Image (cartoon, grey):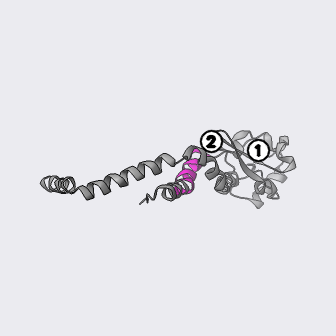
């Protein structure tokens, strides 16, 4: 404790160091005031939307909704269930994965409106009952994947933005 007290006394007694330290704090404060994270966040999400769609495709390959439950209803035909299981055994027999040609997944994209993001596919048949019957959780991130996206993809982009604007480096 004496050592910290002594260092503080040195800083306090040296006006140059104190002014430099305060100047740096003032500059940092101004840099942080210039951050507009709320306005930039939608752009960051759009910039990294490829990861959102990739995580959703991964869920679909497992035949899972964003809730973690299996996609239902199951395929009605045993023949089709067998054929689909041969194409994608990860989903399991009879469990829909919404993938035959890959066009639906390739057409997935993210849009932002206000504070919400939306995932849709731009293929003509995206609104057909054959896909909409699975509900909105069919192409929504699970909580686990949302956490992974935020921590592994979005956070580094936010860190880079803050570093660019303030010079602050994250460890």
Q: Position of residue 89 (x, y in %)?
A: 71, 58
Which is more toward the observer, 20 or 98? 20
Q: Which residues are magenta?
A: 142-156
- Marker disc for residue 168: none
Q: Secondary structure at mark 1?
A: loop
Is the C terminus in the top left, top right, bottom left or bottom right quadrant?
bottom left
Q: Is disc 2 placed on a helix, strand or loop?
A: loop
Residue lying at 75% horizontally and 41% vertically, measured from the top left: 134
Compared to residue 169, the image places residue 34 above or below, namely above
98, 160: nearer the viewer:
160
- Residue 108 position, x and y percent, is 75, 52
Please report whichever mark, 2 or 1, sits nearer to the chain's N-terminal start: 2
Q: Residue furthest right?
A: 124
Separation of marks 2 and 1 at Cα, in angstroms: 17 Å
Residue 74: give its label: 1
- Is-magenta flag for residue 74? no
* Horizontal side, residue 31 vs residue 58: left or right: left
Q: Report how many numbered discs are placed on residues in the image.
A: 2
Asked if residue 163 lies left or right of residue 72, the reply is left
Residue 146, magenta (yes or no): yes
User: Which residue lies under the disc numbered 2?
Assistant: 67
């Amino acid at each position: 404790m004496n050592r910290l007290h002594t260092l503080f006394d040195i800083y306090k007694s040296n006006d140059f160091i104190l002014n430099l330290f305060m100047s740096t704090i003032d500059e940092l404060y101004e840099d942080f005031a210039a951050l507009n994270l709320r306005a930039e966040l939608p752009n960051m999400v759009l910039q990294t939307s490829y990861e959102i769609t990739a995580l959703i495709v991964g869920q679909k390959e497992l035949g899972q909704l964003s809730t973690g439950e299996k996609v239902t209803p199951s395929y009605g035909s045993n023949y089709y269930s067998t054929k689909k299981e041969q194409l994608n055994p990860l989903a399991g027999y009879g469990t829909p994965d919404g993938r035959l040609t890959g066009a639906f997944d390739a057409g997935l994209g993210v849009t932002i409106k206000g504070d919400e993001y939306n995932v849709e596919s731009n293929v003509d048949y995206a609104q057909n009952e054959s896909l909409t019957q699975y509900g909105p959780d069919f192409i929504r991130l699970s909580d686990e994947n949302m956490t992974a996206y935020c921590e592994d993809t979005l956070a580094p982009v936010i860190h880079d933005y803050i570093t660019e604007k303030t010079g602050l480096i994250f460890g």
